[in-house]
Image (cartoon, rainbow, N blue to C red):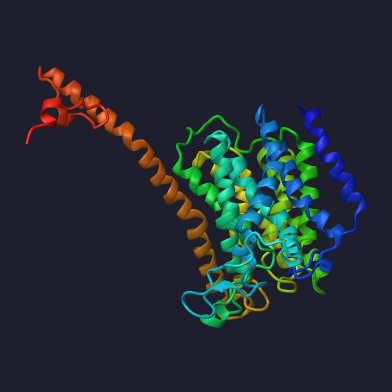
Amino acid sequence: MKRGISFLWAPLLMLALEMPVWAAPATPVAGNDLATSAYLLAWLWPAGLALVLVGISEGWSISDVAAMLPIAMALAVLAELLSAFGLHYGGALLGAEWEPFGPGWGLLGHAGLLASSELVSVAMLYDLPRLTVALLPPLVVLRGRVWPWARYLVALICGILLYPVAGNWVDGGGWLARLGDTLGLGAGFVDAGLVSLPLVTTLATLGVALALPRGHATPDAPELRPAYLPLHVLLGGVLGLLGWLALLPGSDGNIVLVVTTLWAAAGAVLFAAFYGWLSRGAVEPGLIGRGLLAGALVVAAAPAGELSLLAAFVLGALAGLALAPLIYLFDQSLRLREQSGLLALLGVIGALALLVPGLLGAGGGLLAGHDGGQLYAQALGLLALGLWGGVLPWAVTTLARAVSALPAQLRERAEQERLRLAAVGQEPSAEALTPVDAPPADDESLNRP
């Protein structure tokens, strides 16, 4: 199996070594703005994350997890063509924003569905690597919990509805980005790296998983599961970091963003290694590979120049230290064993990253000497994304399970009633039977006046 998977990383490594690190444009407005090399390099972000997921998988699940990357890419293309672009960028790029509560309170775009203009095509291409990453959580985490077609359906719903609507709120002309104008909360909800988009689909995956039956905790399991393919995890972390750097907003401050991200990644790697040494007496490759990505994510929401290098390093160090306990939380306490590191990485670390601009941002952070307006905006945005991405899917899944289990519950209740009446020597009446099990009515009774 190791030899069968090894072909995945060789072309990716050659691509990373041969291509320059250019930045993708902040807003997809023209075909010339999207450099081909930068766009191809951005695909290292989902490819690297997939390698990490493969490296921490075990047994027969390795081949299934490896197949989820091309499936996520295909579903991402389908979602963009169906509705994702129109709901996400219909307001910002095409001027068609639905604002039912007045100006500044846009909820979604309503133009660009199935469009094929050059503008739309470039925007779709720009968004595909991000959307592919966002669709990996439902495809990977729900493996073994639902039928394969069900997790594909959940991923598609995330792509055509949850992801683009949240994207509209954050950077598509929606209400979260304009909280500074409508409610006077700092500069509005700030998410420079669009961490909130994979966060929404990760929360949706968590909500669905919590609504489904979960396995029993395994007390004898190790606190930190080892990396079964350590080279894949380490290489995936490096390639994913390079792809993430390619997705940083292109501007004069891009070099600042790159340096800040690297400092945070360095802090996460060093302290993740330190945690592995404390807990096992040796460095854990699986934790280091995921620590690279955790360090990049924890500072991703802050715009260029908002964080000092020391603050970035400290945030990365905290993310590296917290990664293993978070994995254990999802693995054992919540009994979500399948790829629990993905939930910790894109879920908890991503959520904490959204609070960084409101706490440490030089332009509005509370700890930087400003009022709490920016922090309120970030907290309100995080609450809204949590309700939209987490609570709503959990409620829908819980309701669907209750409705689907109702016939079985009625049949069980009828059987219990038959047994109770048989115990006292009586025949069950037609009213005690379910409509499905009730005998047909007498033909003569149908003719009575």
Residue 79 coordinates in the image, percent (x, y):
63, 53
Observer able to see residue 387: yes
Residue 275 coordinates in the image, percent (x, y):
68, 46
On the picture, is 271 further left or further right than 219? right
Observer able to see residue 326: no
Q: Quadrant of residue 129?
A: bottom right
On the picture, is 255 further left or further right than 168? right
Does residue 374 sit above or below 283 in this rendering?
Answer: below
On the picture, is 202 further left or further right than 280? left
Q: Given the current orientation, which residue lies at the most extreme left position?
A: 449
- Between 348 and 389, the one lying in front of the other is 389
Residue 375 coordinates in the image, percent (x, y):
56, 73
- Between 206 and 370, the one lying in front of the other is 206
Residue 418 coordinates in the image, percent (x, y):
19, 23
- Between 138 and 189, the one lying in front of the other is 138
The residue positioned 60% from the left and 56% from the top of the image is 199
Tally the numbered discs: 0
Q: Quadrant of the C terminus?
A: top left
The residue positioned 81% from the left and 34% from the top of the image is 6
Q: Quadrant of the N terminus?
A: top right
Q: Quadrant of residue 131?
A: bottom right
On the picture, is 306 further left or further right than 372? right
- Between 129 and 82, the one lying in front of the other is 82
The residue positioned 53% from the left and 39% from the top of the image is 150
Does residue 364 sit above or below 133 in this rendering?
Answer: below
